[in-house]
Image (cartoon, grey):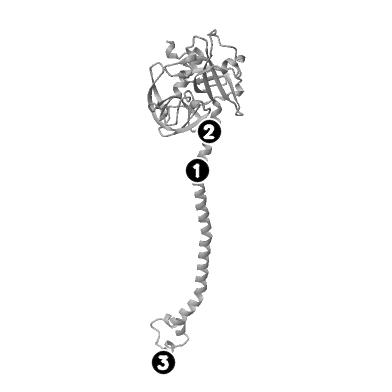
Amino acid sequence: MVLASLPSSSPSPPPTTLIRRKTAPSIIPTSSPTPASSRSSKRDDPVITRRTTISLLASSLALPSLYSSSLSARADEKDEPQQDEDRVVQLFQEASPSVVFIKDLELRGAATPTKSPPEEELVEDDEELRNAKVEGTGSGFVWDKAGHIVTNYHVVAKLATDKSGLHRCKVYFEDYKGDTFSKEGKIVGFDPAFDLAVLKVDVEGDKLRPALMGTSHDLRVGQSCFAIGNPYGYEHTLTTGVVSGLGREIPSPNGRPIRGAIQTDAAINAGNSGGPLIDSYGHVIGVNTATFTRKGTGISSGVNFAIPIDAVVRTVPYLIVYGTSVSNRF
């Protein structure tokens, strides 16, 4: 190696010397391929083995993590329906105490004065009431802690137009503890054009849970909704569905069209009228009022309608204060 770095002008060494240095045994063995490969294989084998072992160990450690992640993902998928179910249950538990069951009663016997009896006389074990004929049933919801109840006009139409003094209205409540009690409902206002009426009951405010008011102007077709009412007398029944359509037109009790009605496939049957249609947050978005039935069956066809809550919010304050809507006052 030292000779290879000498300048070219240096005298050449004797040939014998070159021959000896070319064949010098001390240089040749270091570049011999066979011993090098064997030595290299002996040197590298442990390294390869260690790398392979570490790689296999890392893979084995990663497998449980991937498996646990897969199990976690599957558990989340299974939990989603359970979470939806729990949410609906909680929604019903929170909204149900705001919903009331309404009975329109007709007293049997001779006509009595138009003035209804005092509240304390209207008790469940009253013989006269036990023999009273149930003219109709419906639903409603608590408007405020002053005891105002919103329902459909057609639920209390006979009471609203009664001139004989034989009609009474009983409103059944459920308190915070789940206990039921009833009070007489006095009609304070109604509007047949919107199929709305307001009753007033004498109940302590702490026993009432007013419904949460929502809005209907930003509803979307396809969003979830829930109807709570008393179909066929089965109190506090929950049905689920979606908003099927918006801006529908349905007839009112006085023949005028109610525009902007909400269409839903949440089941609404006899006895649901006047009850709330609520959204996924428990806010009232409409008042259940009508359904198309299969001819001769009386069974809901899945095409049901509710009065939009925005129209209700505009109308009810006038019914409470004036007894009629603003449209009927001018």
Q: Distance from label 2 to label 3 (Cα)?
A: 107 Å
Lower sequence index among marks 2 and 3: 3
Determine the secondary structure under disc 2. helix
Q: Nearer the viewer, mark 1 or mark 3?
A: 1
Q: Nearer the viewer, mark 2 or mark 3?
A: 2
Amino acid type for the residue under numbered disc 1: Glu
Q: Distance from label 2 to label 1 (Cα)?
A: 16 Å
Above or below: residue 319 compared with residue 284: above
Amino acid type for the residue under numbered disc 2: Leu
Residue 1 visible? The answer is: no
Lower sequence index among marks 2 and 1: 1
Q: Which residue is mark 2?
A: 91
- Where is residue 190? Give x, y as percent: 47, 15
Q: Which residue is mark 3?
A: 16
Q: Which residue is mark 1?
A: 80
**Circles 2 and 1: CB atoms closer than 8 Å:** no
Front position in the image: 212 or 127:
127
Q: Quadrant of residue 290?
A: top left
